[in-house]
Image: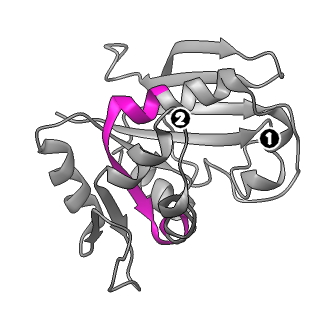
Amino acid sequence: MRKIIVSEFLTLDGVMEAPNEWSFPYWNEEIGKFKLDELFASDALLLGRVTYEGFAGAWPSRTDEAGFAERMNTLPKYVVSTTLSNLEWNNSILVKGDIAQEISKLKQQNGRDILVGGSSTLVHTLIQHSLVDVYRLLIYPVILGKGKRLFTDGKKNELKLVEETPFTTGVVGLVYVRADEAGEK
């Protein structure tokens, strides 16, 4: 079974909104490798409308030596939206209807993991329906005090830390799996 991997840039106080406004001063090659490795370990992206529109406006014109842009542009992209009807970024597939059921079907398909980035509304839905298998979080040494947070619904989720990576810029990469998936329950 494929896993849903939620990968987020977070402030120390859990804000995931607008990382372009606070994460860039901390970016370095170590973080770039962390993101490249997770992208190449997946074989599909799952995106909400807002993140999809941002990515679709930026990635098709990008190139890089590591192949990140090419991977972003060629991976299948499952887009959850109630308002979009036409997806122009190549390999994009619209997901409508019962989102929890449709994502559960995606998880049952053969393949590697499905990566979710940004997409706060979608991520909240995935959390609500216990569809997230792994959280890959880059925690930045920034406190904003306001903004959209990763965890908002009060639903208890027990997790097990399986990887921690401190970066020289003060960012910490944390990878958690659901405790029930790790045999902890």
Q: What stretch is highlighted in magenta?
A: 37-52
Q: What x and y, as percent, mark residue 148?
A: 70, 59
* N-terminal-most mark, 2 or 1: 1
Q: Do the residues labelled 2 and 1 touch (CB within 8 Å)?
A: no
Determine the CA span between mark 2 and mark 1.
34 Å
Q: What element carries label 1?
A: loop
Q: Which of 39 and 140 is in front in this view?
A: 39
Residue under numbered circle 2: 65
Residue under numbered circle 1: 13
Residue occupying image coordinates x 37% and y 13%: 184
Residue occupying image coordinates x 74% and y 27%: 28
Q: What x and y, as percent, mark residue 9?
A: 66, 41
Q: Nearer the viewer, residue 113 or 64?
A: 64
Q: What x and y, as percent, mark residue 114?
A: 32, 42
Q: Which of 160 and 57 is in front in this view?
A: 57
Amino acid identity at mark 2: Glu
Q: In the image, is residue 99 above or below residue 70?
A: below
- In the displayed structure, does residue 106 sit left or right of residue 155? left
Q: What element carries label 2?
A: loop
Q: In which quarter of the image is the N terminus?
A: top left
